[in-house]
Image (cartoon, rainbow, N blue to C red):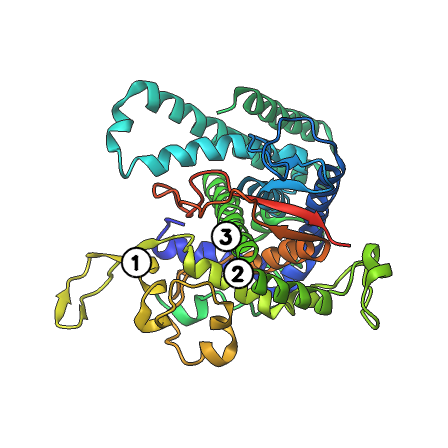
Amino acid sequence: MTSEGKVWRAHRTLMMPAFDFKALARLQRIFETATNRLLANLDVACKSAVTRTTTGSKPFVRSAETLTPAGDGTCVMEISSTFRQVTLEVISEVALGMTPNAAAVFPQLFEVVLDELNERPFHPWRSWVPTIEWPHRANIKRLNDLVTATIASRRAERKHTAAGSSAAVAAAAATAAGITSMTAAGGVGDDADALQMSGSGAGVSISGKVIFEDGDMLDMLLDSGGELSDRELSDEVKTMLLAGHETSAMMLTWATYLLAANPAAMARAVAEVDEVLGVHPSRAATAPPGARVVEKPTFDDYRGLRYLECVLKEAMRLYSPVPLLNRELQADDTLGEFRIPAGSTIVVSIWSIHMNPEIWGPDVADFRPDRFLPEETKRRHPWSFMPFSLGARSCIGQNLAYTEAKTVLGGLLRSYSLALPPDHTPPVTDKYVMPLRPAERLNVIVTPRK
């Protein structure tokens, strides 16, 4: 994320095959498995009896829990934390082959580190306060130790599996497991066009190995022949874990909220899901005549959710996950009548572009997914929408993010109806945090579809 020049170019070249559409198709199983875990948890919560105090005409609970039974066949879901857990499970398995239980340690580590880092641009004095700085450094060390131990374990496993030995594998795995347990207990340029994320290619690493056929991103990097150091591997893994879950979670959060707040758009999205993905077998008895009953949609089915993709894009326009970014000029340039010398830092306000009525029209503040239908998109400047940045340094994982989000949200709408609670008030964003997220709990009422 922060590397430059030859290092950035070399690492991006190594990583790009992992985000090819053919490689993503092999990841569909992981996306679906995480979605099914969420649906199973929702099913339990909706069937559970109320065990907490409720108020109002419809049982509704604000609590620290992600899913709260309402006692009437529905439940209340706090969407921000729910989707953060889902996307973290996905990227932990994609990057490191971790099970959901093993990956459960990462929220405790990432959240406290990120929260503190998000505070510091606005309150730089925090780094001078020992009672803040020392715990912050300790949390960073725990995160680094866990990732480093995982890399060491994988190197030992590969080395000794090839040699027919298992002793060192068990020792390295035990070391990694010990750090995981400890952490859980402790808590808190050139060729720009060619380098852009296009999703084209064969999903094959530089070594010739088919990506994700029987491994993960760490395997791909170790197989790349690039001879990355443990520090370089650690940096890539942490970047994938961070960027691969937080932005996707916020995309899902805001899209779900906006659908729940706009019943007409919700109905249209549900109709598309039923048509493209097919009706779930659990609802076959009440399906309309001629409806397709499909147990397991394909990768191409999820890619075919065009309107849902428009919903996701419109959500990222209104709630830009990264509101601004910096770029450093490598050569002298001009902006209008102004000369800008090389070495200058340019701050690009993505939020300002996304909310510019000259680009998007007088209804710029309204939720209107049709803005991203092909007939409207072709009339706008191609650089008017950049939630994942643009150019050579555009986000390499954007296709993974869209594919994962369509799988999760499509699976959710296929089985459940979503609505805002009766005491809902418009959400306030946390101005200190990137990606942009709600400042408080953001709940929706989840009801099984009949």
Place of residue 255 in the rendered image (x, y in percent of width and height, measured from the top left): 53, 56
- The answer to whether one can see residue 319 in this image is yes
Q: Nearer the viewer, residue 135 or 274?
A: 274
Q: Is residue 234 left or right of residue 131?
A: right
Question: Residue 265, position in %: x, y?
Answer: 57, 64
Amino acid identity at mark 3: Trp
Measured in 3D between alpha carbons, the distance from the residue under mark 3 to the one under mark 2, in whole angstroms, is: 8 Å
Q: Which residue is mark 1?
A: 349
Residue lying furthest front: 57
The answer to which of marks 1 and 3 sits earlier in the sequence is 3
Q: SS at mark 3? A: helix
Q: Are marks 2 and 1 in contact (CB under 8 Å)?
A: no
Picture coordinates of residue 84 (x, y %)? Answer: 55, 43
- Residue, disc 3: 254
Whichever of labels 2 and 1 marks the residue nearer the N terminus, that label is: 2
Q: Kindly identify the residue that appears in the image at 18 percent across and 61 percent down.
A: 342
Instruction: Reply above or below: 97 against 357.
Output: above
Element type where label 2 sits in the image = helix
Are there few (<14), some (14-19), or many (20+) residues within 10 Å of tag 3? many
Residue 228 in the image: state x and y as whole percent. Answer: 49, 46
